[in-house]
Amino acid sequence: MPNDFNQHVIDEFRAHRGRLTGPFEHARLLLLTTTGARSGAPHTTPVGYLPDGGDRVLVIASAGGSPRHPDWYRNLLARPHATVESGAFTYEARAVVLAGEERDRAFARAVEADPGWAAYQEKTERVIPVVALYEAGRGGPPPVNASSPGEAIKVVHDAFRRELALIRREMTTGGSALGAQLRVNCLTFCRGLHHHHTGEDTMLFPFLGERYPEHGPVLDRLRAEHVRIAELVERLRRAVSGAGSGDGGAAAARAEVVLLTEELEAHLTYEEEQLLPLLDAGPGASGPPA
């Protein structure tokens, strides 16, 4: 993409923490900052990514089907380290180029989710690389891109809202089958939501309960809703894992996503109404990270 267009996407991405408009409104993008192979200068590029269900995400060096690898990929070959901005989080990452069958399976998932990747491969004689980005140097989740604890909660919640909306859209437009990448997207979302709620149950809620004992009933309700949402997440996980190529399995997974969306949105909204004023009440109210 032209540099001026890239810069517009970068500016909008950062201003709205990953939420874009226009042609990338429904795309999964991240900002990838690499170090120039020859210049040594930092270069930031918006790139599409694939959730991979574990401790990594995948990026594809398509360059729109150009015969030449994109600059960011050649930079990573020289220095396999990058800064990743996901919208809610910024973290340092280690880059590993996938090879052989692992690369082919990942690229096939990408094509299944979006045939445009196959069109890019058809335009070029080079084998389009797939790169895994592993979060580096931390034992826990990266810090949230926010200036206060309350803002951090809202940023993380909005990231979950956006991801679930993307999954619902992909399920609606994906035909009768539940594709491999869509399964990975769902399972990655389930894993992230589980970790977030576990962190709240073990760190944030005890902190607030000690500081604001009068809000005990609110925290009890939120804990109970976590249990209910965990049940819905497990139902979705089973539906996605068990869905075959027929419409029945995909329809069951879609129904579970709709139910989870409705109950999760109500939970997130209630939590924001009740807890954000406490978290942002003043310097003494800062608490554990979201």
Image (cartoon, rainbow, N blue to C red):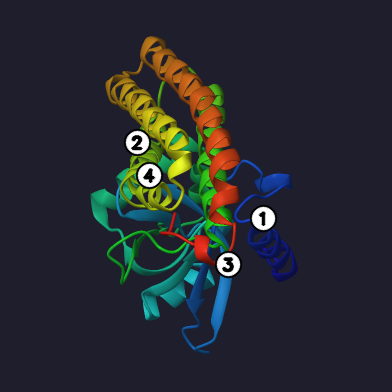
Q: Position of residue 172 (x, y in %)?
A: 55, 22
Horizontal side of 120 relative to 201 (left or right) equals right
- Of labels 3 and 2, the one closer to you: 2
Which of the two residues, 145 or 26, is positioned nearer the viewer here? Answer: 145
Mark carried by residue 187: 2
Q: Position of residue 239 (x, y in %)?
A: 33, 20
Q: Few, some or many C-alpha atoms within 10 Å of disc 2 (few <14, some 14-19, many ≥20)?
A: many
Secondary structure beneath dot 1 equals: loop
Q: Write the residue at 37% across / 42% down.
A: 197
Real-space CA distance between mark 1 and mark 4, rounded to the nearest whole angstrom: 21 Å
Looking at the image, is 198 positioned above or below residue 211? above
Mark carried by residue 192: 4
Looking at the image, is 59 positioned above or below residue 192? below
3 and 1 marks in contact (CB < 8 Å): no
- Of labels 3 and 1, the one closer to you: 1
Looking at the image, is 231 positioned above or below residue 73? above
Q: Earlier in the sequence, mark 3 or mark 1?
A: 1
Which of the two residues, 82 or 65, is positioned nearer the viewer here? Answer: 82
Residue situated furthest front in the rendering: 214
Residue situated furthest top in the rendering: 248
Kind of residue at disc 4: Gly
Q: Write the residue at 47% across / 60% down.
A: 61
Kind of residue at disc 1: His
Asked whether residue 4 appears in the rendered view, the answer is: yes
- For the image shown, how many numbered marks are present on the structure? 4
Residue situated furthest left in the rendering: 101
**Residue position marked by numbered label 1 in the rendering:** 16
